[in-house]
Amino acid sequence: MSNVIIIGNGPAGVSAALYTSRAGISTLIIAKDAGALEKAEKIENYFGFGEPISGKELSERGIAQAKRLGVEFLNDEVVSLEYDGQLGVVTKNNRYAAEAVVLATGAPRVAPRIKGLKEFEGAGVSYCAICDGFFYKEKDVAVLGCCEYALHEAQALMPLARSVTLVTNAEKPMEGLPEGLTVITTKIKQLEGEGRLEALLFEDGSRLGVSGLFIAQGVAGSAELARKLGAETAVNRILVNENMETNIPGLFAAGDCTGGMLQIAKAVCQGAEAGAAAVKLIRSRKTAASI
């Protein structure tokens, strides 16, 4: 078991790991890819560099620094968070327990541009199957997405809903989908309903009657993962206190996922605060247990 699991290997996640690892806390970073930083061509507003540095090089330097200090890295996709007396991180391939989790996957992805999507949020459109699935018991629902995250949401809904349809919006669905899961690859034109979602209208003119549509495109962002544990969010940013703590004990968030200034300097600072706070929490628990 890792005492701390950090989701995301960008500036916030690596910064948090530097603090937890140097404090002697077993630390695991889970990330599917390098994130937005690696795509930055030049960075010249970050302290300590006389000449501009590419985001890729800065990312590589940070990861190398963390590895030198003993931080473990796992290339995997996180699909959910759980709590069964202890925090658990569920990936595409496994489940990992931790005393503390730091969410640091950056800013949430942009929701798909589909007419009616915004209007039906909270009235049929949801971003969390674990949170809202119960409200669609014995009803027809759809999941928008094509990959591991969408499959995880669909599997959470299948025992509850009357029917679950995976809508890929013109994307190719992944292989090995479970029996009983219908797949529609046609692109959605708009959502329809009177006050609440009632149907999806596709570009070929066909319709699918549903009471709920669960958005699960791409990979799960920090806000989506936080909501699965009941952490407070606002407009897709995670609400934290001055120590980067959410309202869920042991769950922290840092970087772009908390909103505000989307800059490396801020991400590094919040990562350090989250890492230091996680260390303090774990040590306080050990002290209490020894008394």
Image: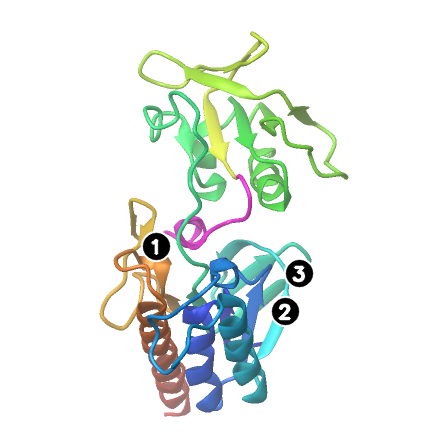
The answer to whether residue 235 is above or below residue 39 is above
| Mark 2 lies on residue | 74
Residue toward you, 40 or 186: 40
Kind of residue sitting beneath label 2: Leu
Q: Measure the alpha-carbon separation of dots 2 and 1.
A: 25 Å
What is the quadrant of residue 48 in the picture?
Answer: bottom left
- Which of the marked residues, 3 or 2, is nearer the chain's N terminus? 2
* Sooner in the amino-acid sequence: mark 2 or mark 1: 2
Residue occupied by mark 1: 231
Vertical order, 42 against 257 (above or below): below
Q: Assess disc 3: are there few (<14), some (14-19) or many (≥20) residues with their C-alpha within 10 Å of its C-alpha.
A: few
**Residue shown at the point (47%, 60%) measured from the top left:** 40
Q: Amino acid at mark 3?
A: Asn
Residue interval drawn in magenta: 217-231
Task: Tell me the SS state at disc 2.
Answer: strand
* SS at mark 1 in the image: loop
Q: Is residue 277 left or right of residue 162?
A: left
Where's the N terminus, which quadrant?
A: bottom right
Q: Is residue 227 magenta?
A: yes
Image location of residue 35, percent across then percent down: 51, 59
Mark carried by residue 94: 3
Q: Which residue is rendered at x = 43% and y = 29% of the image?
A: 113
Residue at image coords 46%, 25%: 212
In which quadrant is the C terminus drawn? Answer: bottom left
Mark 3–mark 2 contact, CB under 8 Å?
no
Q: Nearer the viewer, residue 285 or 192?
A: 192
